[in-house]
Amino acid sequence: MKVKYSIRTSEILFERAQESIPGGVNSPVRAFKSVGGTPVFFERAEGAYLYDVDGNRYIDLIASWGPMILGHSHPTVVEAVARQVSVATSFGAPTRLEIEMAELMKEMVPGLEMVRMVNSGTEACMSALRLARGYTGKNKFIKFNGCYHGHADSFLVKAGSGVATFDIQNVPGVTGGTAQDTLTAPYNDIEAVKRLIDQNPGDIAAIIVEPVAGNMGCVPPQNDFLKKLRTLCDLYGIILIFDEVMTGFRLAPGGAQQRLGIQADLVTFGKVIGGGLPVGAFGGKRDIMKAIAPLGNVYQAGTLSGNPLAMTAGYATLSILNQHSEIYSELDHKTELLEKKLSEALSANGWTFVANRLGSMLSFHFDVDQVTNFEQASKANLNTFKKFFHHMLSRGVYLPPSAFESYFLSNALSNADIEYIADMAYEFKNIG
Ligand code: PMP
C-alpha cells in the first residue's frame, strides 16, 4: 500500500522555529513563502538524496544552492573534515592549508594571481567591490537587473534571488546615499551599459556580472555580452568583476572564465569552494589585489577567514574536481538529459515553457517565449511554477522553491534518478 506523503514533523518544527527565528528560517527563500506550504526540515543527506525529519527521501536538484557538486557526504570530503576536526578547528593565525588552497585555486582558475579567503559569497562580492573602488578611486558601479551578489547594501538594488522572489523594490535600510552609486542595466543589454558609461564619465569603478546568471533562473549570456563588457572595461579603465559564486568550479575547473574564454580583472567565489562549509573568496590580478590590507589600505578582514575546517572541506572538493575533470562532462550530460526528459514530459502535457541551461545550471520558466533578462523572467507564470514545485516535492523531487533560482545538479545524480524525475513530471497534467 502506498503511504501518503506527510511532513507532519516539519510542520511542527516550522511552528516552533517561527517563535525564535524570523520567518522560521535563516535565509528567506527557504521559507517557501513564494510557493506556499511548509518548508521541509532536513536531517541527513547522502549522494543525490536528502532525507527529511519525517523520513521522506528526495532527489536533490539544488545541491545546497550549488556547493554540493560531488553529492552529499562525499567519503573523501567527510574523511578529510573528520581528520581536521580532531587536529584543530580555528587558530585565527596563518596555516599551510591556506597556501595550499590558494595555490590550488590559482592552478585551476585562469588569470587568478592572488586570492583572499572570506566566509561567504556576500563577503567576497562586497570586498571585491570595495577593492575596485579603492583601487580606481571611483565610486559608482554597474550591476545587472536580476543578478544577485549577496546582501551587502550596494547590491540590493534590482537584485535577483530572494529579493526578486519577494518582489522587494526598495530594501528598507539601504540608504539613498548608498543606492545612488549602484547603476543598473538589463542583463545582456550592452547598449544600456554604454549609455550608463556615457552618463557617468570617469565615475565608474566596476562592472559586476554573473557570467551566467543563476538568480533569475538560469540566464546565459548572449551575443558576446561578456566579451563586449570586457572591451568596454578596457576602454574606460573600469574593473570587470565576474561573480563566480555560482559558476566557479561548476561550469568548468576554471569556472565561467575558462568555459566562456573571457578574463575578468577580479573574480568572486563561494559555494563549491567550501565543499559544504561556509567559504567565499575573491581574487584576480596581482596589481589590484596588492591594494588590500596589509599590503595596501583597502581594509578587509575576518576572524574565521581561512578557517582550517572550511579550507579542508574546500580543498578536498577542489582536489577531486581538479583530478577528475571528466566530472564536468558527466555533469553536462546529466543536465542535458534532465533538460530533455523534463521538457518532453512537460510538453507532452501541454505546458509551454522556456528551458535555459548552461552546463549543470538549468531552469524552466512557464508561459514565456524567451528569457534573456530579468524583465522576461519576471513575466513567467508563477502559479504554474508553484503547482509544479509542489507536485514534484510530494513525489520526492526537491526543486528550488523559487522561480528566480537555478537548478544545480550534483554528480551523484544517476540516470535512474533522472528517469524517475521525468516520470513524475509526466504526472503533472495541464487540466486548464
Ligand atoms: N553571488 C551569487 C552569484 C550568488 O548566487 C550568491 C548566493 N546565492 C551570492 C553572491 C551570495 O553568496 P552567500 O549566500 O554565500 O553570501
Image (cartoon, rainbow, N blue to C red):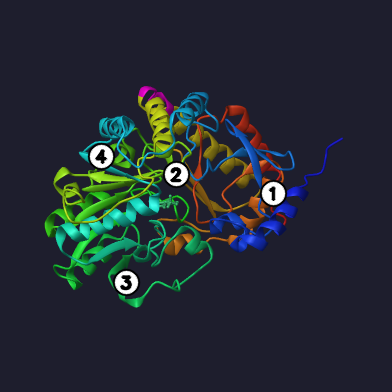
Q: Is mark 2 within 8 Å of ligand 1?
A: yes
Location of residue 96 with respect to 150 vertically, above or below: above
Residue 406 on image: x %, y %: 49, 48
Task: Name which residue type carries label 1.
Answer: His
Task: Name which residue type carries label 3.
Answer: Thr
Looking at the rendered image, the disc whose residue lies closer to the viewer, 2 or 1, is: 2
In 3D space, how far apart are the residues under numbered discs 3 and 1 (Cα atoms)?
A: 42 Å
Looking at marks 2 and 3 on the same chain, the residue that comes earlier in the sequence is marked by 3
On screen, residue 163 versus residue 200, left or right, reads right
Q: Which residues are magenta?
A: 323-327
Mark 3: secondary structure: helix
Disc 4 designates what residue? 261
Location of residue 137 with respect to 282 vertically, above or below: below
In 3D space, how far apart are the residues under numbered discs 2 and 3 (Cα atoms)?
A: 27 Å
Residue 96 on image: x %, y %: 30, 30
Give neighbour class at mark 2: few <14, some 14-19, many 20+ (Cα, 10 Å): many
Looking at marks 3 and 1 on the same chain, the residue that comes earlier in the sequence is marked by 3
Looking at marks 4 and 2 on the same chain, the residue that comes earlier in the sequence is marked by 4
In 3D space, how far apart are the residues under numbered discs 2 and 1 (Cα atoms)?
A: 32 Å
Disc 1 designates what residue? 391
